[in-house]
Image (spheres, grey):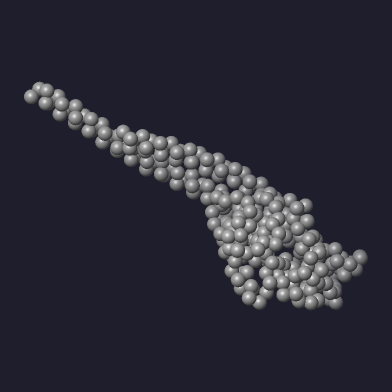
């Protein structure tokens, strides 16, 4: 009887877990849908900014900026921003990002001073466990807003132009689709300057524009905007990746709970049938003993 009670309690616990994971799956699905729509809506703006910078840069051949050419003096410092989640239960999302960030840091640590900054509590906990100092921890959350990301990007622009770092790298998860997300390292600063041939090849045409104000003045405004837009897009894709991987993980957990619940039910039925058979055997044996 004690064994049957234990199995029955486990069945109840598994059903409760299944309901919890199903609810978490539904929440993650709703968040993924909303985040995916926001990321999709921001992509045309990011592409337009990139194309505009390419067009203007192709007409400013002698334009010089530390945002493109790099700092005047090398400091031997690289800033690495690692974007993770605040919560777990999202499959291998955090593990893949942190593994990529750790490999990148180890590849540079012997020759370069790598300054680590994080976005997400999981990254803070990981580097604390590894004994790596985290310079700053940014609280962006799983629904990044442009205002929050813009503040981070502006601080990076100010510090980079002040000559604090040679480059700024961002380690995040890139969203390609529901079935594919990959951890990538994106160089935020300095930006790469496109050539005129690349611009023409990308657009399929060779347009000629007249700029007012001049190309150099326009680039002074467009380049910081490009940095902010790029960082915001990286945060948006990281959020989409987090939600879709949590959705998939919770669906797998729900399915496993259902399968395990069925297994426990079969075990319970077999044990119950065995107990009934034993009781019937005892009754029959008792009756036979009395008649004898």
**Would you say 179 lies left or right of 56 here?**
left
Location of residue 83 by image quarter: bottom right
**Would you say 210 lies left or right of 18 here?**
right
Residue drawn at the location 59% of the way across and 69% of the way down: 103
Question: From what the image shows, is residue 167 above or below residue 14?
Answer: below
**From this viewpoint, which residue is outermost toward the top?**
291
**Would you say 47 lies left or right of 2 here?**
right
Would residue 176 be seen by someone viewing this image from the given angle?
no
Residue drawn at the location 26% of the way across and 36% of the way down: 274
Residue drawn at the location 89% of the way across and 67% of the way down: 217
Which of 287/261 is in front? 287
Quadrant location of the N terminus in the rendered image:
top left
**Percent x, y of residue 135:** 70, 62
Quadrant location of the C terminus in the rendered image:
top left
**From this viewpoint, which residue is outermost toward the right?**
213
Q: How many marks?
A: 0
**Percent x, y of residue 15:** 46, 38
Question: From what the image shows, is residue 201 above or below residue 266?
Answer: below
Which of 235/210 is in front? 235
Question: From what the image shows, is residue 106 above or below residue 267?
Answer: below
Would residue 245 be seen by someone viewing this image from the given angle?
yes
**Percent x, y of residue 53:** 80, 66
Residue drawn at the location 68% of the way across and 50% of the way down: 141
**Percent x, y of residue 149:** 74, 55
């Amino acid at each position: 009887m004690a064994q049957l009670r234990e199995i029955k309690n486990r069945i109840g616990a598994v059903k409760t877990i299944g309901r919890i994971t199903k609810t978490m799956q539904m929440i993650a699905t709703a968040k993924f849908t909303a985040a995916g729509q926001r990321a999709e809506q921001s992509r045309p703006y990011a592409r337009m900014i990139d194309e505009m910078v390419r067009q203007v840069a192709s007409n400013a051949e002698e334009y010089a900026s530390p945002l493109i050419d790099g700092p005047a003096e090398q400091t031997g410092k690289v800033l690495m921003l690692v974007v993770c989640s605040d919560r777990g239960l999202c499959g291998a999302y955090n593990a893949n990002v942190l593994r990529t960030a750790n490999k990148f840091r180890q590849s540079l640590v012997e020759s370069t001073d790598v300054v680590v900054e994080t976005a997400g509590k999981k990254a803070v906990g990981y580097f604390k466990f590894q004994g790596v100092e985290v310079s700053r921890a940014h609280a962006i959350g799983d629904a990044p807003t442009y205002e929050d990301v813009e503040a981070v990007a502006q601080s990076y622009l100010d510090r980079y132009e002040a000559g604090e770092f040679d480059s700024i790298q961002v380690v995040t998860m890139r969203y390609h689709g529901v079935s594919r997300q990959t951890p990538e390292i994106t160089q935020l600063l300095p930006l790469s300057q496109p050539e005129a041939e690349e611009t023409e090849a990308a657009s399929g045409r060779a347009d000629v524009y007249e700029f007012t104000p001049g190309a150099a003045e326009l680039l002074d405004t467009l380049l910081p905007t490009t940095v902010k837009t790029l960082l915001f897009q990286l945060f948006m894709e990281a959020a989409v990746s987090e939600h879709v991987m949590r959705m998939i993980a919770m669906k797998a957990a729900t399915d496993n709970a259902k399968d395990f619940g069925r297994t426990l039910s079969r075990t319970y039925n077999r044990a119950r049938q065995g107990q009934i058979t034993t009781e019937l055997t005892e009754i029959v044996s008792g009756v036979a003993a009395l008649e004898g």
